Image (cartoon, helix red, strand yellow):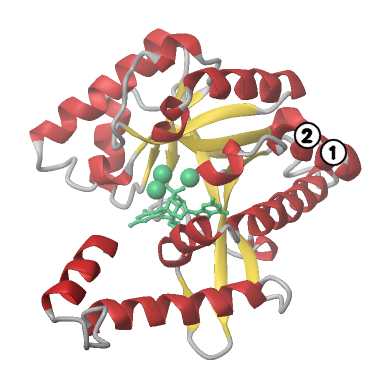
Amino acid sequence: YADSALYEAKKSGRNTLHFFSPLLQQKLEEEAVMLERLHHAIHQQQMSLHYQKQWALNPLTQDVHEIGAEALIRWIDPVHGMITPDKFIPLAEKSGSIIPLGEWILKEAFTQLKSWQDDPQKRHWQLSINISIKQFERDDFISMVQELLQSFQCDATKIRFELTESLLINDLKSSLRKIYALTKLGISLSIDDFGTGYSSLAYLKRLPIHELKIDKSFIRDLASDHADVILVQTILGIGKRFGLDVVAEGVETEEQYQRLRDMGCRYFQGYLFSKPTPPSLL
Ligand code: C2E
Ligand code: MG
Ligand code: MG
Ligand code: MG
């Protein structure tokens, strides 16, 4: 962006004020407005966490049962309505707002877990929380998590952090140290959107992770695209050999579910089973 803006500025001569193309300018202005709103959103209680249940197959009965849920953030802006995380999480990462937002997410999620622990029906549930690269990279990430665990008094062995693989490989040595520290606290690790990043499989042998999540882009055309069948089989095979749980996300149809079961998948998440909901509706 900067380069092309500079190029345009040079091209149009010294006396011009048109440093940016109108489209780029508009994009930057929109981003600035969005950032300003994002900044206030936490304090004005516009953020909430929804939860999508995760399901496990009982191979004997072929029934599924709930084993926990993934926390997914929702932003309801009083003027613009619901804004999806794909739109604001990247912006929050770019601007640094993800740090206070990420801490808020952890507190909110820990409070939820605590309440499940007092509910006989949900006592065994595990809670998956998405962690942003910018959050994980911080030097104080582990101590922050440790302090929150202590003050919220929740069972760390029920907590699963979802990380994307790009994040782990950037700085494998530091990731390794942090992941060991989390494991020591009792928290388990899941690789989200597995297979979609620029990944090196080498980290699988180095990192004590517990779960792979098959990205929904591999599930979507499972019934018609043989390449997706091969990819999903491969991921299930990797999981099996490394002793990791493999969760299929974005399961929407009976046919996808049937195929996944036939391939030996045991854990599921998707609209076919349940949509993300406010915690009161779980
Ligand atoms: P993700 O962690 O891979 O989450 C899965 C996404 O798939 C969620 O979108 C979920 O609502 C959606 N989904 C679940 N089942 C289905 C299905 O059957 N079909 C389809 N088409 N979609 C399904 P959502 O909630 O919009 O979140 C998008 C992404 O935003 C997440 O991807 C995650 O990367 C990020 N995100 C969401 N909440 C948080 C958060 O609390 N913290 C951070 N750092 N990132 C978050
Ligand atoms: Mg996730
Ligand atoms: Mg995912
Ligand atoms: Mg994703």
- Residue at (11% x, 32% y) in the render: 227
Residue 97 falls left or right of residue 144: left
Q: Nearer the viewer, residue 132 or 115?
A: 132
Mark drawn on residue 180: none
* Mark 2 nearby-residue class (10 Å; few <14, some 14–19, many ≥20): few
- Residue at (43% x, 39% y) in the render: 268
Q: Amino acid at mark 1?
A: Glu
- Residue identifier under label 2: 143
**Residue 175 location in percent, x, y?**
55, 24
242 shown above or below 21: above
Q: Nearer the viewer, residue 128 or 253?
A: 128
The reply to whether residue 188 is in sight is yes
150 shown above or below 101: above
Q: Amino acid at mark 2?
A: Ser
Residue most extreme to the bottom: 79
**Residue 279 location in percent, x, y?**
67, 60
Residue 156 falls left or right of residue 282: right
Where on the image, by quarter, is ligand 3?
A: top left
- Residue at (57% x, 79% y) in the render: 37
- Callout 2 secondary element: helix
**Residue 217 location in percent, x, y?**
25, 46
- Residue at (81% x, 51% y) in the render: 115
Q: Nearer the viewer, residue 180 or 116?
A: 180
Residue 32 falls left or right of residue 119: left
The reply to whether residue 64 is in sight is no
**Residue 146 location in percent, x, y?**
80, 34
- Residue identifier under label 1: 147
Quick check: marks 1 and 2 in contact, CB under 8 Å? yes
